[in-house]
Amino acid sequence: MAFQEILRNFATMKKIYLILLICCLSLEMMAQTKGFSADTLSNAVFARMQGKSYPKGCTIKRSDLRYLQVLHYDADGKVHKGELVCNRKIAADLLDIFQKLYEAHYPIERMTLVDDYDANDERSMTANNTSCFCYRVVTGSKHLSKHAQGLAIDINPLQNPCVKTRKDGSTWVQPKAGKKYTNRKNKYPYKLEKGDLCYRLFIEHGFSWGGNWRSTKDYQHFEK
């Protein structure tokens, strides 16, 4: 009797295991159908990056980068398919963040590879394009940007510009077209501000926000 009981228990546990396995696979399939995925760089994606965000002499390994596809809403409530390249270390963070932003209808105007703008940061930001990896130095320096490592992301950069007040009192703004969005008391369709959902999610995932910097305020920028 004891042996038969063991067999029955084993059969029951086997059924439970199969049910759990099916549930896990179903959840994975649901995530894929929802349009959220992270993959290694395909040859087609890597070809788009060559000589642009991934220039000759780039020291970041291709294997350390991930190609993300996500869904996002714009300010008019329309759904778009977004794409970006990031470091594998933050791929899971970004997938979770963008899925939650999507579920909350948080507006992001555009999200495509910076290579579609020939890796020209000014052009990409002027188009209000959300992007991550781009092998380049920090503007005005010789130091590699966190973007060069794929560990920084700019969200709706046109309406959340980088602003620096010089010693002479003049203001430097990037992108230049973002100057009209430097008054952070005003409301803009794609404005990112401290305490909003986007801010909270990135902070919860261990990112720091450029809007908290002292001498320069980079309202679009999160890095890890």
Image (cartoon, rainbow, N blue to C red):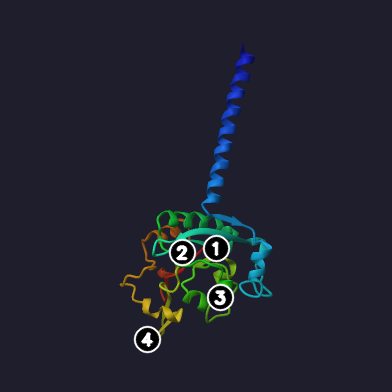
Residue at (56% x, 46% y) in the render: 29
Q: Are marks 1 and 4 in contact (CB under 8 Å)?
A: no
Vertical comparison of 146 with 197: above or below: below
Q: Which residue is mark 3?
A: 117
Numbered disc 2: secondary structure: strand
| Mark closer to the chain start, 4 or 3 | 3
- Give the CA distance from mark 4 to mark 3: 32 Å
Neighbourhood count class around disc 1 (C-alpha, 10 Å): few under 14, some 14–19, many 20 upward: many
Q: Which residue is most to the left?
A: 185
| Mark closer to the chain start, 1 or 4 | 1
Q: Which residue is mark 1?
A: 83
Q: Are marks 3 and 2 in contact (CB under 8 Å)?
A: no
Q: Which residue is mark 2?
A: 208
Residue at (56% x, 30% y) in the render: 16
- Give the CA distance from mark 1 to mark 2: 22 Å
- Give the CA distance from mark 4 to mark 2: 27 Å
Neighbourhood count class around disc 2 (C-alpha, 10 Å): few under 14, some 14–19, many 20 upward: some
Q: Position of residue 178 (x, y in %)?
A: 41, 78
Residue at (39% x, 58% y) in the render: 197
Q: Which residue is mark 4?
A: 169
